[in-house]
Image (cartoon, helix red, strand yellow):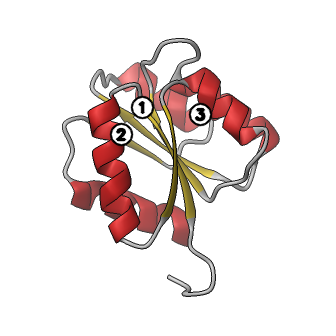
Amino acid sequence: MSATKKKRLLIVDDEGDLRDLLGRVLTTEGYEIVTASDGAEAIGILRKETFDVALLDILMPEENGLTVLKHIQEHHPGMKSIMITAYSNLHTAIEAKGFGASEFISKPYKFETILLALRKALNS
């Protein structure tokens, strides 16, 4: 990763402890992190800032992760998105891929899985 410009990540998850832990891990990996607790907050942030990748929980209050994914595709077409969910099913995974998601990761996950998905998304 370039020392001059850290890659910016938006982490969107309504589980505060998980969101904060993932943010700390990714910060130590050299990423610049911004977090949101739900989809509506994420869309508000995306209206003002740009990111390289979004890590999106699917089921959240207010706007869900698929709604945020659609917003990203419409307004930030170069941005990558990785969907993360505890409620994975084939239909949702296909829908997320159809809206441009780079990866679909089920909870619980290993941090190595997230790091690998981020590297793949940033190198594609």
In the image: residue 106, left or right of residue 70: left
Considering only vertical position in the picture, is 57 above or below 46?
Answer: above
Assess disc 2: are there few (<14), some (14-19) or many (≥20) residues with their C-alpha within 10 Å of its C-alpha.
some
Quote the CA–CA distance across marks 2 and 3.
Answer: 25 Å
Badge 3 element: helix
Residue at mark 3? 98
In the image, what residue type sits under mark 2?
A: Arg
Please provide percent x and percent y for residue 54: 54, 47
Sequence-wise, the earlier of marks 1 and 3 is 1
**Which is more foreground, mark 1 or mark 3?**
1
Sequence-wise, the earlier of marks 2 and 1 is 1
Residue at mark 2? 19
> Toward which corner of the image does residue 73 lie, by quadrant?
top right
Please provide percent x and percent y for residue 13: 42, 31
Badge 2 element: helix
Q: Residue at x 24, y 56 (%)?
A: 111
As drawn, the label of residue 31 is none
Q: Residue furthest bottom?
A: 3
Sequence-wise, the earlier of marks 2 and 3 is 2
Quote the CA–CA distance across marks 2 and 1.
Answer: 6 Å
Residue at mark 1? 13
Badge 1 element: loop
In the image: residue 49, left or right of residue 55: right
Quote the CA–CA distance across marks 1 and 3.
Answer: 21 Å
Q: Where the C terminus falls, by quadrant?
A: bottom right
In the image, what residue type sits under mark 3?
A: Gly
Q: Are marks 2 and 1 in contact (CB under 8 Å)?
A: yes
Considering only vertical position in the picture, is 42 above or below 50?
Answer: above
Q: Residue at x 29, y 21 (%)?
A: 87
Q: Residue at x 19, y 37 (%)?
A: 108
